[in-house]
Amino acid sequence: MQTTVQHVDFSQQQPVITTASLQDIASIQVLLNHYAQMGQLLPRSKSDLEANISRFRIIKRNDEVIACGSLEHFTDELAEARSLMVKESHKGQGLGDALLRDMVDRAKTLNVKRLMALTYVPAFFHGVGFKTVNKEIFPEKVWGICVNCYKFENCDEIAVLLELP
């Protein structure tokens, strides 16, 4: 009697999203710095990552962070999806979408009413229901974080917003 072995495509499995730890900082920084050098993301220092590591969610393959994102909780009214990046070699696998949906779910558990992001790829966020808006409607972000950014006077990022139930 012959047994047929089915081929299983493990690349199509649901990604495992976990909370980042201090041991993940170097790998996260490599990923973020790659995109920062290309001008697609603002850089984040090691000390900033250390202070905010509990806000990061990651996806790993072979002990390497291949996707990350953080949720910045400003007020009961507003949170931000930040530093959402997928390693170039893993794009198109739904990892960014999975992380963004994870952030939306976490924002809902915090009873946040609005989730925003500043991005260069608004269409990605539109796919999850975000709408393009004027960034000035987020004083918590603009005067809390943006004011310290080297691009503050000439910010070219696009603001997107998702109203949460």
Image: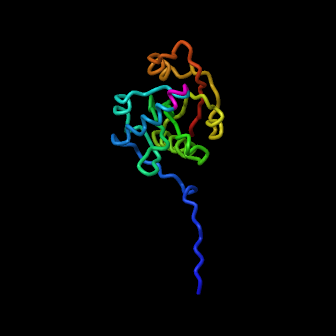
| Residue in the foreground of this view, choosing between 136 and 27 | 27
From the viewer's perspective, is 163 left or right of 27? Answer: right
Q: Residue at horizontal 47%, vertical 22%? A: 140
Residue 19, x across and y down, in percent: 40, 45
From the viewer's perspective, is 146 left or right of 12? Answer: left
Tell me the colour scheme of the image.
rainbow
Q: Is residue 37 magenta?
A: yes
Residue 143, x across and y down, in percent: 47, 17
Looking at the image, which residue sits at the far top?
153
- Determine which quarter of the picture holds residue 124: top right
> Which stretch appears magenta?
35-39
Q: Residue at horizontal 53%, vertical 22%? A: 138
- Determine which quarter of the picture holds residue 11: bottom right
| Residue in the foreground of this view, choosing between 124 and 135 | 124
Q: Quadrant of the C terminus?
A: top right
Q: Dominant secondary structure of the magenta stretch?
A: helix
- Determine which quarter of the picture holds residue 40: top right
Q: Is residue 130 magenta?
A: no
Q: Quadrant of the N terminus?
A: bottom right
Q: Residue at horizontal 62%, vertical 40%? A: 128
Residue 122, x across and y down, in percent: 63, 31
Using the image, determine if residue 77 lies above or below residue 24.
above
Q: Residue at horizontal 52%, vertical 41%? A: 87
Using the image, determine if residue 131 lies above or below residue 145.
below
Residue 135, x across and y down, in percent: 57, 21
Give the total number of marks visible in the rendering: 0
Looking at the image, which residue sits at the far bottom?
1
